[in-house]
Amino acid sequence: MSTHGDGTHLVVMGVAGSGKTTVAALLAKRLDLALAEADDFHPPANVAKMHAGHPLTDEDRAPWLLAIRDWLDEQTAAGRHAVVTCSALKRAYRDVLRTARGPVRFVHLDGSRELLEERISARQGHFMPPSLLDSQLDTLEPLDPDEDGFTVGIEDEPEEIADQVVERLSRR
């Protein structure tokens, strides 16, 4: 079971290049959480569409979000707490994830367009091209005050970002 103690699943969210995968892996290790990468839940058609430089529609994302939610349900049923990466760009998407059994808290990794573009351009072998960053930034709806979650900047090293997240979680 998780050492953050409250039985909450974490969704590390943000646009491409924000460090979701790296930070989520650090959190999974530090907090003894099951870990999943949302990209692994995309159907092949979504991957092909993004690889071709086309942004996904809400209809494209619907089965993907339900698959992530179902995975969180499986973790709850198995008595595990989890962290999953997911862009979760719109509140409506986060609302789907919030229907998982057990509480879901969002950790929004946020940074400047310039830093994000630099990081995306440096990645090798990822299906998300830098050309889709503007689409993601245009779609992003930051967490609303009534959503369970918080925002952390991405300017620091991943270990320091994970430290900030753990510290924020311990305050709750």
Image (cartoon, rainbow, N blue to C red):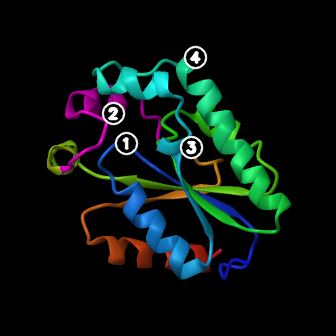
Spatial CA span between label 1 and label 4: 19 Å
> Which residues lie in the magenta part?
123-143
- Give the labeled residue for mark 1: 15
**Residue shown at 31% from the left, 36% from the top:** 127
Q: Using residue 84 as the reference point, say whether residue 14 is left or right of it.
A: left
Label 4's element?
helix
Q: Position of residue 115 (x, y in %)?
A: 18, 51
Spatial CA span between label 4 and label 3: 23 Å
Label 1's element?
loop
Which amino acid type is marked by label 4?
Answer: Glu
Which amino acid type is marked by label 2?
Answer: Leu
Whether pointer 2 and pointer 3 mark residues with C-beta atoms closer than 8 Å, the reply is no
Q: Using residue 29 as the reference point, say whether residue 96 is left or right of it.
A: right
Any mark on residue 137, and which? Answer: 2
Q: Earlier in the sequence, mark 1 or mark 4?
A: 1
Q: Position of residue 120 (x, y in %)?
A: 22, 45
Badge 1 crowding class, 10 Å Cα cut-off, few under 14, some 14 to 19, many 20 or more, is many
- Give the labeled residue for mark 3: 144
Any mark on residue 59, and which? Answer: 4
Which amino acid type is marked by label 3?
Answer: Asp
Instruction: Report the number of discs.
Output: 4
- Nearer mark to the viewer, of 4 and 3: 4
Label 2's element?
helix
Spatial CA span between label 3 and label 1: 17 Å
Q: Earlier in the sequence, mark 2 or mark 3?
A: 2
Whether pointer 2 and pointer 1 mark residues with C-beta atoms closer than 8 Å, the reply is yes
Badge 4 crowding class, 10 Å Cα cut-off, few under 14, some 14 to 19, many 20 or more, is few
Residue 168, visible in the rendered structure:
no
